[in-house]
Image (cartoon, rainbow, N blue to C red):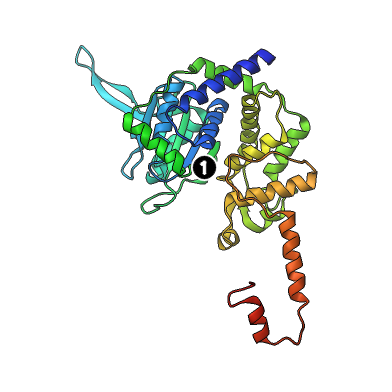
Amino acid sequence: MVTEKDIQLFSQQCTNIFTQISRDIIGQEKVVLGTVIAMIAGGNVLLEGVPGVGKTRLVRSLGRVFDLPFARIQFTPDLMPADVTGTNIIVKDEKGNSQFKFQPGPVFSNIILADEINRATPKTQSALLEAMQEHTVTVMGVSRKLSEPFFVLATQNPIEQDGTYPLPEAQMDRFMFKLLVPDPSLTELMQIVSMTQKTMEEVAEKACTAEELLAMRRTANQIPIAEDVLKYAMILTSATHPDSECATEAAKKYIRVGASPRAGQAIVSASKVLALIKGRYNVSYYDLCEMAYPVFRHRIKLNFEAIADRVSADDVITMILGEVEKKYHKKVTEGKPLADIPEAQTAEEDENDSATAEEESAEPAGEDAEGKKKKRGLFGRK
């Protein structure tokens, strides 16, 4: 049973973790928050961003903060599965007899950076599937357990797609979060350059051990969730399917395939951790809406109409959240900081647009085209 002391200890440890990470990482609060939530919840993260925004530095800092071994795998087209998992090699003992000995690969670490994972062939990409889901590696018919905690942080470049292999759906589904890494602002860029001019080394100190991280995970699993809140999480997941009983109009119009049941598991687990980070004992509707973006954005598959209308996955998720909130009368008052969504048009702007439309429709029918042109200007209304 979780006590108030456990919640206070959890919140205090998270504060220390974020404080130490901020010594190495300037800005990127949403990315850091999402990554730490996934680590505590026991999930994996896919980071999407252009080169040079600090993805590798973030993983190295996490290794220092959690005092865990860190391994980097640079995925290339010629990388083989054995380069990831390890293989059996022939060695000779003291008597000169030959025997097979397993040589572990870089996957036998606690924190794995799969850099540019979409540059490897599907055969090599699939070498991580078993490790990400079952936390085991099978080589030559022998399964070996990976040490806990085990965390995979993969990166991919959204710009350069030549010579890449898109991740299969089965592997995308095994990532708890997909986080978008934005470019730093002007102030953050100045702070980054000033900090790296002094030293390129990470200066973060240990804030949490592996045993403490696993204890935080057990605490989060015991956080209660009300039946109505749990049902709302499942409604959000089902609302992404265009042919489900909870299907929304946005899903019917823009989504080809909805989120899997793993999305329902991920959004509940992540919301429990988020509630504890904020010092709360229970999961709220807002927690679910905030976690919906990183959980759903890589699990829903958009159709051609969404591409033609230039609608992103985050835009569709925003529509779905709005429709579900309106249909089930669950008012979510707080913002959604894990996604940069443009603000919706206000009611006042809607009224102004309606009034403008009425004025245009009320123009005299006999007015000639030249008079209209003078009134509206050459490129629109003055």
User: Is residue 209 in view from this perspective?
Assistant: yes
* Picture residue at 49% right of the left edge, 46% below the top: 168
Label 1, on which residue? 172
Q: Position of residue 221 (x, y in %)?
A: 64, 23
Residue 107 pos. (x, y %): 40, 29
Classify residue 141 by image quadrant: top left
Side of 4 where 184 appears, left or right? left
Identified at 43% across, 44% down, the residue is 156
* Image location of residue 158, percent across then percent down: 44, 49
Quarter of the figure with the N terminus: top right
Residue 97 in the image, given as x and y percentages of width and height: 22, 17
In the displayed structure, would residue 164 be above or below residue 368? above
In the image shown, does 39 or 173 lie closer to the viewer? 39
- Callout 1 environment at 10 Å: few (<14), some (14 to 19), or many (20+)? some
Q: Is residue 115 left or right of residue 277?
A: left
Q: Quadrant of the C terminus?
A: bottom right
